[in-house]
Amino acid sequence: NLADARYFAAEGVEWMGFCFNRESPKNISLEYAQEILNWVNGPKVIAEISYQNINEINELVEKLGMDFIQTKEKFQSVAYSLITIPIIQEIIIDNGFSEEKLRQTLSELKKYTAYFLLNFNQNKICWKNICKKEFLSIEILQSICKEYPVILDFDFNKENLFLPVYGQGMH
């Protein structure tokens, strides 16, 4: 909403995202997003998209002046080259995601992607799981974050906010 957008912009947030995924309860109209953007200055603006075709994505980007798109979708390689702004590729992590599978996915998509958003929250994988090495370890995440531009989406709170991982940011 406008009040939150203005508050966080004044606090100096780096990025601000708008959900344009039609299936999401967080979906925002193009008109309302434009109204908010008219009042906000500073943050880079992200269009969170899903299931839109390339023409719809580029039209959205052009109308609103977006800086990035964020998507869970894996496009065909030719489609990536048609998107006119940098991509934040969201990767939904689940318990079946091994280090090998994660590295393979990152390697395949790195030439198309500005950042990788590793979403652990969607499948309720907690920071405690990582610390206990029930899943990917801190050392694996450190290595991946040094090799790739990574944003981590975890259950961050005041106890685990200062993590020994070297990613680009937290979500």
Image (cartoon, rainbow, N blue to C red):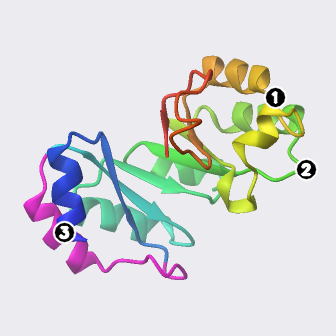
Q: Secondary structure at mark 2?
A: loop
The N terminus is located in which quarter? bottom left
- The residue singled out by tag 2 in the image is 96
Left or right of 112: which side holds 67? Answer: left
- Sooner in the amino-acid sequence: mark 1 or mark 3: 3
Check disc 3 and give the amino acid type.
Leu
- Sooner in the amino-acid sequence: mark 2 or mark 3: 3
Point out residue 58 in the picture as x, y percentages from the top left corner.
36, 61
Residues at marks 1 and 3 touching, judged by CB atoms closer than 8 Å: no
Residue at x 78%, y 32% (from the top left corner): 131
Q: Secondary structure at mark 1?
A: loop
Point out residue 137 in the picture as x, y percentages from the top left corner.
81, 28
Q: Is 29 part of what is drawn in magenta?
A: yes
Q: Residues within 10 Å of mark 1 (few under 14, many from 20)?
A: some
Q: Residues within 10 Å of mark 3 (few under 14, many from 20)?
A: some
- The residue singled out by tag 3 in the image is 2
The answer to whether residue 12 is visible is: yes
Q: Residues within 10 Å of mark 2 (few under 14, many from 20)?
A: few
Label 2 to label 3, Cα distance in Å?
A: 39 Å
Label 1 to label 2, Cα distance in Å?
A: 14 Å
The mark lying in front, picked from 1 and 2, is 1
Judging depth in this view, the residue of 163 and 34 nearest the camera is: 163
Q: Is residue 141 above or below residue 94?
A: above
Judging depth in this view, the residue of 91 and 167 nearest the camera is: 167
Q: Quadrant of residue 147?
A: top right
Point out residue 46 in the picture as x, y percentages from the top left corner.
36, 53
- The residue singled out by tag 1 in the image is 137
Q: Is 91 part of what is drawn in magenta?
A: no
Magenta segment: 22-41
